[in-house]
Image: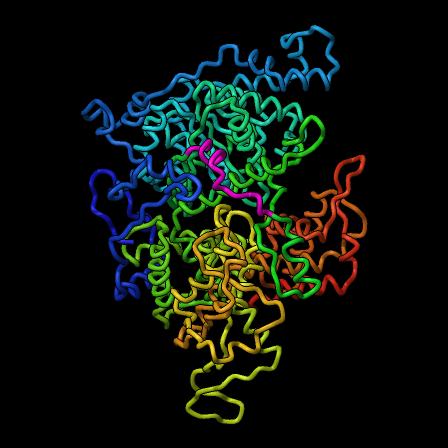
Amino acid sequence: MVQEKTDGKDEDMMLPPIQPNRPALSWESKIGKKLKLATPCLGNFRPVVGQCCGLCTPDSLRKTPRPTSPLGFKNLLSIKETQTRYRGWLVRRVCCVLFVSGCKIYTSPVSNRLDRVCQSKRVKEALTAEHNAQEGRDGQGQLSHLSPLPSIVNTCISPGFLRFLSWVMLKMFSSVFGSIQVNLDHLPALHRASQEECPLVYVYVRQSAADCALIPLVLFGHNLRVPYTVCPLHIKSSFLRSILQKVGVVLLPPSALTEQDAESDRLYSLVMTSLVRELLDESQAISVGVSAESGRGGRWLAHVTQLIKEGSVPDVSLVAVGISYDRIPQINTQVGLGSLFRWLWSLPWRRPNGSVRVHLAQPFSLKEMCDSGRCRVDEWLPLQDLLLPVILNNRAACVFGRRRMSWLLPPSLYATERGEQTHRERDLSIAIILHLIYSATSCTAVMSTSLVSSLLLFRHHKGVSASALSRDMAWLTKEVLFRNKDVGFGGSLEEVVRCSLSLLAPHLVIAAAPSRSDPVIVPRPTRAATLHLSLHAQIVTHTFISEAVGACAVSAMLCELVDSGVSSRVRSGGVDGEQVNGDMEFDVVLCQSELMERALQLCHLLPPGFMPPCQSSLNFALEAVDSLVRFGILIMEEIPREAPICDYWKKEGAVTWTTSDDPYCSDSDCEAEEQDSHCYKISQPSQFPELLFFLCSMLAGHLRTLCWATSGLDLIHTPLPEAEIVAVMHSHLCDTASRTKQHYESCSEEAAHIAVRSLIDLGVLLEERQSGGVSLCVAPLFQSSENRQKLQRFISQYLFN
């Protein structure tokens, strides 16, 4: 968070101070006076992020060496005359126009593209099968059956339209954001990859519709090839659709309101596969957004992977893009000309607020990932095989393997002519999708609003003073940087905290009493405010996911100790009645195998994107336990072999674990004498309970959603489509949160979607194919209240209250 030296690139890196054209609020002035005594933030270290995976793509990692020093950042909105070929008074006033006119644009030929798509084998077979084409009828005669897909296929990039819209977008974003900082570390690698004529595919995690415009604008401003952008919005205006299709925006068909509607049409899927092939043959770049909750957008990546496996395209370079916002802009998914004009009319009265940080990761070869075999998918198992024996039969032994998230891709995409599914190819495509989601999240910078939101939600939900918040902010920033995550802010501690609270002010209650010099900040106890803070705090949960999993495993074991009646020794200065003074010293040893088993079981319940698919679940569980040792929560102790070890935790048939670095080692490699050779004791620093609870609270929202969804199974009496099940669960989650008047972070629509998918993977909800489509119903095994209670107890053991 230190203000770095300005060298022409980083001069706009520091967050702008609170706007001087308005009077400071009372709480802002008090925060400024209070924080002047605090230590300014902190160190000169800024990590280099976005390295490609050394396990899956080591050749790509060696091909692009790591920069010896960070190259810094550049504010995309700060355009000066030095970025043009001209100088002078007039140039300074029209430098944005001159800059846009001087940027390089790569040609985008579209001649005969529609004919080539229609003549492809897969499209001709689909047209013949679905529309009963006459014998000998060629592709040109079948164009009427493709309507309205020809306009999508003929999407192009017009230099004139691209320059004009780039200028418009620069002006629009300058009215919305204070700065758009672009990480320059991997731009030389992208330039080298583009010169090799290897098509680039940019992949980002969807947060807002602004993502679709940010990536092409960043690449255009740095003289890289502007990609064809897959846009998930439903554009109703034909005039607006024609403009966007001239700058490379691939839109949904006018008849499809959502991506689900478009993807349900098999002809659309085949045409889009052929379109992707033609674009890659033309060496065009593609930009795709993927949803971590529903997997939307993953079909496009599956098209690319399928073409690589078929040999239709030699190779593709994948680039993960991390985009982080101080304040995420909300844009309606259905855009019309009237709504666009109203939004443009409001721009002159907007005050630019917040900043954006864009990280372009190092490109890596998709062919290398597909052909090397390093990305193992043969050990993927259904979630019910991994957890149901533990939940229903209380078996101590876990089944090794990774959870198969088959719902990220529809089964019809990999159906063969005999109606069979190639599970391995489908799992490989899913692994690539998960890998890109994880890579894009890993290189996403942590913004100041994310740190403040996580502290207020997970550590100080009842309120905190400004001085205590600033101290925790400095501590949390150190921990984030220590985990090789970049932060998207700079400046003094006073500026960072004050700017963050200003951006989050509509969702906070800031009490600044005249008699109190230190204001108190409390999150607003409303659903909208909690969901907004939770959305910002997700990136912090991703950063501390290993520690959070380990903390929940420790919490589950401690709760079992309390429930079993095992006593603890209390070391205190004195006991007065029931009051205990002093520190509590737990006289209990946590067995390594039991602790890792709990962590492994919890790993299977995590949403997609938290774990890299190239890492085994066993290694992730080991890392979760080791991270608590590094964090100072646990202390490892060696136990002599002749001494009885963890008698309370030993169970018949317990699993033996190995600490080998081989991610695919089996339990047969473990020697008998190594079983339970390590144990852990809980450290006793003064801040230990608060730190453990802070980490446990990061996963409490997701776990609570699963518990509430399990209790809502009583509402499902008949088979219903998945969309209706999600709606029923979402309504149940909202009603439950409203009754308790808390935990609103567990009732979002995304949380309901993930919970329904987890219940399907667990076998709690079964899919039934009916004439109208696929419906979901409660499995006979979980129609019993006893089994539902077992499932709820299993999930709630990790839930810290």
Does any portion of residue 509 appear in the rendered image?
Answer: no
**Is 368 a magenta residue?**
yes
The quadrant in which residue 159 appears is top left
The quadrant in which residue 349 appears is top left
Residue farthest to the left?
88
Q: Is residue 394 left or right of residue 11?
A: right
Residue 735 location (% of width, % of height): 67, 58
Name above or below for residue 676 compared with residue 584.
above
Name above or below for residue 369 compared with residue 150.
below
Does any portion of residue 712 appear in the rendered image?
Answer: yes
Colour setting: rainbow
Name above or below for residue 249 compared with residue 425.
above
Boundaries of the magenta span: 365-380
Residue 531 location (% of width, % of height): 54, 53
Residue 757 location (% of width, % of height): 65, 48
Name above or below for residue 408 compared with residue 633.
above
Residue 175 location (% of width, % of height): 39, 37
Frontmost residue, 43 versus 483: 483
